[in-house]
Amino acid sequence: MTDGEIVLTAPEAAALLKISLSAAYSYAQRGILPAFKVAGNVRFLKSDVLARIDELRMKARGGKALKAAFVVLALAFLYNGAALYLYQDAQGYHVTISEVC
């Protein structure tokens, strides 16, 4: 944390994100939103909250673009006698290729 950074309380972070207070606490506890405690009270850096929003927004956009590209690739591979499988896990999207008999 640097000088001049804005520190938010849980109600302020919830209001900024337009989520319930209980959701803000839950996201902090699960690590979805970076948070820290001061004298036992949960606090958020406004810059961290805004950065997390940007990350989630980019991830959502990237996922849609990847799925659209996958459809095009899958059609091309099926045409050439192979099958593509797309799956997602905690590390991201993965593609496997197999021959069609």
Image: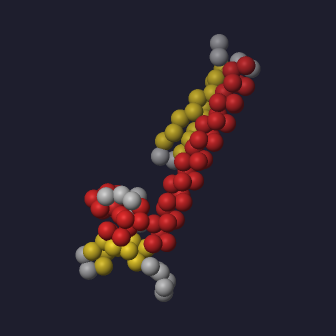
- Can residue 36 be seen here? The reply is no
Q: Position of residue 64 (x, y in %)?
A: 59, 41
Total marks placed: 0
At a point 49% along the width and 60% down the height, the residue shown is: 53
**Residue 76 in the image: x percent, y percent?**
73, 25
Q: Quadrant of residue 21?
A: bottom left
**Residue 45 at x, y percent in the picture:** 43, 73
Viewer-proximal residue among 40 and 94: 40
- Give the residue at the far top of this rendering: 101
Position of residue 32 in the picture relative to residue 82 (left or right)? left
- Indicate the colouring scheme: secondary structure
Q: Where in the figure is residue 31, as x and y percent of width and height?
A: 38, 60
Residue 36's place in the image compared with 60, above or below, is: below
Q: Residue at left 69%, top 24%?
A: 75
Quadrant of the rendering where the C terminus is positioned: top right
Left or right? Give the position of 29 relative to 65: left
